[in-house]
Amino acid sequence: MKIAILSRGPRLYSTRRLREAAAQRGHFVKVLDTNKFSIHVEEEEPSLSYHARNLPHYDAVIPRIGASITFFGCSVVRQFEQMGVFTLNSSHAIAVSRDKLRSLQILSRHSIGIPQSAFVRDKKDVLPAVAKVGGTPVIIKLLEGTQGIGVILADSIDVASAIIETLQSTRQNVLIQKFVAESKGRDIRAFVVGDRVVAAMRRRAQGQEFRSNVHRGGQTEALELDSEYEQTAVRAAQIMGLRVAGVDMLEAEDGPKVMEVNSSPGLEGIETISGVDIAGAIIELMEEEVLFPEIDVRQRLTVKGGYGVSEVPIGTKSEFVGQTIAETGLRERDVLVLSINRNGVVIPNPRGSRELLAGDELLCFGKLLTLKGLVPPPRKRRTKKKAKNKAK
């Protein structure tokens, strides 16, 4: 394959390792400075030029987009996508993951641990927002900060208000987050490649510093994740739409809390401490993805009128609980079960002898009329407060 690595730092450890790993597997690799591209938008002929010359064809692109050039970098990656070139992480996923608020908003729709957070613009809303996340101390973050930059610990309401007012006066958007005291200046970085965590490390802040980032002097140690943390990391990356990601999690009393999902995670610290060839795993994943590209099942399978794809949840009162797929009679009703999602684990192409359990979620293709009868009507979402009152 002919691979382009989009990076402004050809001598950086991560860029060098990716180039070496690709070359070792027999690929032609070139590092291209993201800022040196020109984007040409023409009818039916999207194209790119590099150093004012027409860009030759590439089979795949590995984006290493720095935070300072997110907008332009995503535009370049998007243009590659329009040209039909495979990109390891999509432009949309990179843009979403860079916005801390947007990332948390998306994760909040799923059953996945995140720190309580609030976003305010009016000074009068600071006090209620701090109370909403559990009171001081709180963490104040710039929405697009990296490497621990723009992350501040405020131990009182007055300090929090002053910090937020100052940052907003410079047109910075800030996020208020609950301070997870039990994490004690520690966090976990899980490196996700595809559908698995290939390596993980625990980072510890030093001295009075509460930020555990390596760039802030944090110490690291290799870590073997338990299943809860591993599944959380993989799901967070998949929800963000990232094939390769660094997922940062806090160790809270009630389980992992996802702080951030990084679309261009550095390799040096985690490869050094773990001894894992992460660069090689990334190139191996890219080979598989180029050979077997993703297909939008919903679009491909709805060509025939009256047919579609739907997710069918199996509730505790479902008639299908305890039955095998064959016993449900779905095939006779012109419905095919493509996969089963069971507690976050996907079972692809399940056999007819597979027994269905309460809590399973079936991805089905078939007659829309039949599928409509299988999908329960949407229930109104209850707030936590209402749920607690009902429990009383």
Image (cartoon, grey):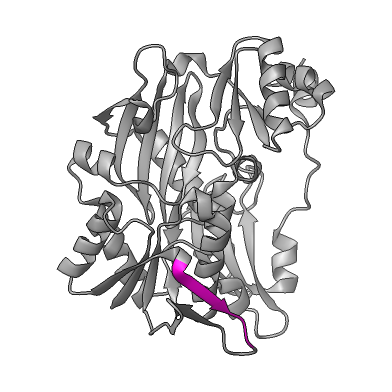
The residue depicted at 45 percent of the width and 32 percent of the height is: 249
Q: Is residue 343 visible?
A: no
Left or right? Give the position of 67 relative to 212.
Answer: right
Left or right? Give the position of 121 relative to 64.
Answer: right
Q: Position of residue 144 (x, y in %)?
A: 57, 42
Is residue 371 positioned above or below 13 on the image?
Answer: below
Is 189 in front, or is 42?
Answer: 42
The residue depicted at 20 percent of the width and 40 percent of the height is: 272
Left or right? Give the position of 109 relative to 251.
Answer: right
The residue depicted at 58 percent of the width and 39 percent of the height is: 111
Is residue 224 positioned above or below 322 on the image?
Answer: above
Q: Position of residue 169 (x, y in %)?
A: 73, 31
Report the quarter where the C terminus lies: top right
Number of residue marks: 0
Q: Is residue 348 visible?
A: yes
Q: Which residues are magenta?
A: 36-42
Question: Is residue 37 shown in magenta?
Answer: yes
Residue that lies at the very extreme toward the bottom in this rendered image: 44
Is 39 in front, or is 139?
Answer: 39
The residue depicted at 38 percent of the width and 27 percent of the height is: 216
Report the quarter where the N terminus lies: bottom left
Q: Position of residue 220 (x, y in %)?
A: 28, 28
Is residue 372 positioned above or below 101 on the image?
Answer: below
Q: Position of residue 134 (x, y in %)?
A: 66, 16
Question: Is residue 243 shown in magenta?
Answer: no
